[in-house]
Amino acid sequence: MAGGFLLAVSLVAGTILGAGQGQASIGFVAGFGVGLALALAVWLLDRRRTR
């Protein structure tokens, strides 16, 4: 499954939303955290499904 897509989209969205509030770096880090959690969830679900 495509967990990397969720990570990439979260990074871009977090940076854009953060830049809109004058905090692009914090938006990038927050987007990374959300994307990482989503990618991890996809990986865990896919791993459970294939076993």
Image: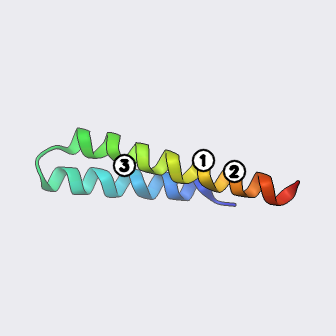
Number of residues whose C-alpha sits closer than 10 Å to that of mark 1, classed few (under 14), some (14–19) or many (20 or more) = some
Q: Are marks 1 and 3 in contact (CB under 8 Å)?
A: no
Is 50 left, or right, of 36 in this rendering?
A: right
- What is the x, y in percent for residue 20? 14, 56
Q: Are marks 2 and 1 in contact (CB under 8 Å)?
A: yes
- Give the residue at the far right of this rendering: 51
Q: Marks 1 and 3, how far apart in space?
A: 14 Å
Amino acid type shown at disc 1: Leu
Amino acid type shown at disc 3: Gly
Is 2 left, or right, of 47 in this rendering?
A: left
Say which residue label 3 marks: 31
User: Which one is nearer the viewer's eye here, 29 or 12?
Assistant: 29
- What is the x, y in percent for residue 49? 81, 60
Q: Are marks 2 and 3 in contact (CB under 8 Å)?
A: no
Say which residue label 2 marks: 44
Q: Give the numbered dot on residue 40.
A: 1
